[in-house]
């Protein structure tokens, strides 16, 4: 009978040990689950923080002019000026001789360095962020009034391109 009592005592000791192991496993599982949840929620917090972050500050850049559709203007001068108060105070320009019909031009704006608007510096202008007025005109060399023109604006935030797909009558701009 002694043997039976020892068996019962041993069984009583094992039951609490099994319970403790089960309890430890449960606690460990809950801790791991909690860590996973915290990790997931911190990822969501990072995504939420990124979506509510302010946009990056505008950056300086060059302005490229892309003009197409100039017709009926052989041997004329294509002059594009850019500035805050054009045409009276442009500070950069792009110039070309119209040598084909139809004529297209792609190029950057360069600083005006002389009395003539096509006297340009060697390096493209890097514009401060902001909006600028652009006038593209086609005229006879030395003339002060355009035969064709277009007026638009461009906002600089890094390097940008201003597209002009057609020129209109001289009344279409403030040249």
Image: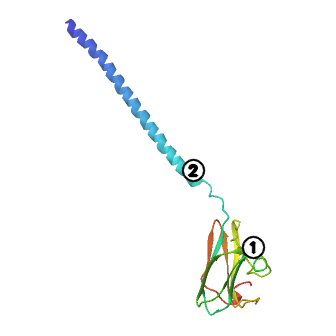
The Cα atoms of the two marked residues, 2 and 1, are separated by 37 Å
Q: In the shown orientation, is residue 164 left or right of residue 115?
A: left
Residue 9 lies in quadrant: top left
In the displayed structure, 11 sits above or below 88; it is above
Please identify the residue farthest to the top as the structure is shown.
Answer: 2
Q: Quadrant of the C terminus?
A: bottom right
Comparing 98 with 129, the one in front is 98
Comparing 45 with 64, the one in front is 64
Observer able to see residue 67: no
Which of label 2 and label 1 is nearer to you? 1
Location of mark 1 (residue): 84
Which x, y percent locates residue 76?
A: 68, 90
Please identify the residue farthest to the right as the structure is shown.
Answer: 115
Residue at x 56%, y 52% (from the top left corner): 50
Residue at x 72%, y 89% (from the top left corner): 146
Instruction: Indicate which disc residue 49 carries.
Output: 2
Circles 2 and 1, Cβ within 8 Å, touching? The answer is no
Mark 2 / mark 1, whichever is N-terminal: 2
Observer able to see residue 132: yes
Secondary structure of the residue carrying numbered label 1? loop
Q: In the shown orientation, is residue 164 left or right of residue 26?
A: right
Q: In the shown orientation, is residue 118 left or right of residue 65?
A: right
Which x, y percent locates residue 110?
A: 70, 74
Residue 103 lies in quadrant: bottom right
Please identify the residue farthest to the left as the structure is shown.
Answer: 1
Residue 116 lies in quadrant: bottom right
Which x, y percent locates residue 57?
A: 66, 59
Which x, y percent locates residue 36?
A: 44, 40
Secondary structure of the residue carrying numbered label 2? helix
Classed neighbour count for the residue bearing mark 2: other residues with Cα under 10 Å, few (<14), some (14–19), many (≥20): few
Q: In the shown orientation, is residue 138 left or right of residue 165?
A: right
């Amino acid at each position: 009978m002694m043997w039976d009592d020892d068996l019962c005592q041993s069984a009583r000791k094992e039951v609490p040990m099994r319970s403790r192991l089960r309890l430890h496993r449960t606690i460990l599982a809950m801790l791991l689950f909690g860590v996973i949840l915290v990790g997931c929620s911190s990822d969501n917090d990072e995504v939420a923080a990124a979506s509510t972050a302010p946009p990056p500050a505008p950056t300086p850049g060059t302005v490229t002019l892309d003009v197409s559709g100039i017709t009926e203007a052989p041997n004329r001068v294509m002059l594009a000026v850019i500035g805050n108060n054009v045409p009276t105070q442009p500070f950069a320009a792009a110039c070309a001789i119209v040598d084909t019909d139809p004529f297209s031009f792609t190029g950057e704006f360069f600083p005006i360095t002389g009395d003539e608007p096509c006297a340009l510096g060697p390096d493209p202008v890097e514009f401060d962020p902001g909006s600028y007025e652009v006038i593209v005109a086609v005229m006879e060399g030395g003339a002060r009034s355009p035969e064709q023109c277009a007026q638009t604006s461009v906002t600089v935030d890094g390097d940008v391109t201003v597209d002009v797909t057609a020129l209109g009558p001289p009344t279409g701009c403030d040249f």
